[in-house]
Amino acid sequence: MTNIRILTAWAHALAYITRETPVRLSVAQLAVFALAALGDRMGTPVTFTQLHDALDGAPGGAIHTTYGVFFEERRGVRNLGWLRQERSVDDLRIKWLRLTPKGAEVLDAVLRHLETGEQD
């Protein structure tokens, strides 16, 4: 894939995400979703602590606030519904971040854009 084709694919993927979100998302928020989606797809879901470590330098509270926008509903606030928390069966203190069906749908569409470089 040429650099222009890669950039085109990236632009279309970002445009798709922009259309799918009723709110503005920051680059940090997109990184949180991408890392959580990567872990889920690899069969090794991540925790809040792992996200914090992966995004070295980002304040913990900022990450906690950032990833909250991806849950279905939190404290009565309707969010995107792309991620859910799942408690570990081995240690109930551990909460894995997993894709919801909507999150998987969004991720698959983004991956299609990145793969083909085409716009919807």
Image (spheres, helix red, strand yellow):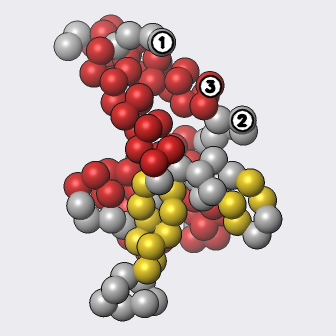
Q: Position of residue 104 (x, y in %)?
A: 41, 44
Secondary structure beneath dot 3 equals helix
Secondary structure beneath dot 1 equals loop
Task: Count residues near mark 1 (Cα–Cα under 10 Å), then give few for <14, some for 14-19, many for 20+.
Answer: few
* 3D distance between C-alphas at marks 2 and 3: 8 Å
Q: Position of residue 91 (x, y in %)?
A: 36, 91
Q: Badges 3 and 1: C-beta atoms under 8 Å apart?
A: no
Residue located 51% across and 56% down the image: 83
Q: Position of residue 15 (x, y in %)?
A: 55, 21
Task: Count residues near mark 2 (Cα–Cα under 10 Å), then give few for <14, some for 14-19, many for 20+.
Answer: few
Q: What is the three-letter code of the residue carrying label 1?
A: Asp
* 3D distance between C-alphas at marks 2 and 1: 18 Å
Mark toward the start of the polypeptide (3 vs 1):
3
Residue located 44% across and 73% down the image: 86
Question: Which residue lies under the disc numbered 1?
Answer: 120
Secondary structure beneath dot 2 equals loop
